[in-house]
């Protein structure tokens, strides 16, 4: 057993070594080289000199550079986005929607070309009377389907009932002629028949009634006021 004590300024190194006689000479030579190396280290405390020696022998640039690359790649793959407020913001996928068709109101028109009011809507008169000449064309107020044809000798005379969209229904009375059949699809550009004075009438005119969801309404509230 060899007890070796090294004394240097501000530093003391105690070594307890167990070596064989055959390796003693080589070991002593190695210790001398190590002591000489410690003397050549820059000034400072014994601990700081030893640490600097270790740091000088390690390639930290290569190690740090490789680790930074791994950290950047990993964070870009797994770390969620953080907003300015510090809260984690989930990834948002935006899907553009196609064009949507919105429901529109029924396009309506007055059933005669030249609108002349003869009598308005009131409690004892469920529609409006439009003046005209016998034979004037009568058009449906909107697209629809003919649901019934009728003749009432002492009241409305020749009548046509048309069902429209949005719960609307219209009745055309006192016609001199009917040019459609039940079940026909009609539109405002094709005449239903011709104006007349059949039934209980004092002269040629068109009596028009309009219903909304089964309840009679003022036709002008649907057709617009003129």
Image: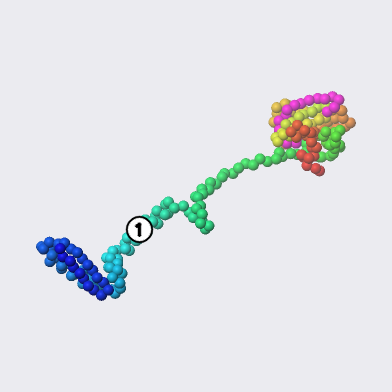
66 left or right of 140?
Answer: left
Percent of width and height locating residue 59: 29, 63
Closer to the camera, 132 or 74? 74
Residue 153 against residue 61 in the figure, above or below: above
Residue 59 against residue 181 in the figure, above or below: below
- Can residue 151 be seen here? The reply is yes
Q: What residue is rendered at 50% in x and 53% in y?
A: 88
Percent of width and height locating residue 42: 28, 73
Query: Which image quarter holds the N terminus?
Result: bottom left
41 left or right of 158?
Answer: left
Percent of width and height locating residue 113: 79, 39
Query: Which image quarter holds the C terminus?
Result: top right
Q: Is residue 187 magenta?
A: no
Identify the secondary structure beneath mark 1.
helix
Span of residues in magenta: 137-156
Q: Quadrant of residue 26?
A: bottom left
Q: Residues within 10 Å of mark 1 (few under 14, many from 20)?
A: few
Closer to the camera, 46 or 62? 46
Q: Quadrant of residue 100?
A: top right
Total of numbered circles in the picture?
Answer: 1
Closer to the camera, 210 or 66? 66
Percent of width and height locating residue 79: 44, 53
In the rendered image, the residue lying farthest to the left is 22
Q: What residue is rendered at 53% in x and 57% in y?
A: 85
Q: What residue is rendered at 75% in x and 36% in y?
A: 141
Q: What residue is rendered at 75% in x and 35% in y?
A: 212
In the rendered image, the residue lying farthest to the right is 202
Q: Is residue 147 magenta?
A: yes
- Can residue 143 be seen here? The reply is no
Residue under label 1, please give it: 67
Residue 36 against residue 165 in the figure, above or below: below
């Amino acid at each position: 057993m060899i007890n070796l004590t090294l004394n240097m300024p501000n530093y003391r190194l105690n070594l307890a070594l167990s070596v064989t006689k055959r390796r003693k000479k080589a070991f002593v030579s190695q210790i001398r080289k190590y002591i000489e190396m410690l003397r050549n280290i820059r000034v400072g405390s014994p601990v700081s000199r030893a640490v600097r020696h270790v740091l000088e022998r390690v390639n930290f640039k290569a190690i740090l550079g490789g680790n930074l690359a791994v950290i950047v790649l990993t964070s870009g793959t797994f770390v969620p986005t953080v907003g300015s407020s510090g809260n984690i913001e989930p990834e948002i996928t935006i899907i553009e929607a196609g064009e949507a068709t919105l429901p529109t109101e029924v396009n309506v028109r007055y059933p005669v070309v030249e609108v002349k009011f003869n009598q308005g809507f009131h409690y004892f008169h469920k529609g409006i009377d439009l003046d005209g000449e016998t034979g004037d064309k009568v058009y449906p107020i909107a697209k629809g389907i003919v649901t019934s044809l009728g003749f009432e000798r002492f009241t409305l005379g020749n009548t046509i009932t048309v069902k429209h969209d949005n719960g609307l229904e219209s009745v055309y009375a006192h016609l001199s002629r009917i040019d459609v059949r039940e079940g026909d699809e009609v539109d405002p550009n094709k005449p239903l028949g011709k104006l007349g004075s059949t039934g209980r009438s004092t002269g040629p005119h068109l009596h028009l009634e309009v219903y909304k969801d089964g309840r009679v309404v003022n036709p002008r509230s649907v057709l617009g006021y003129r």
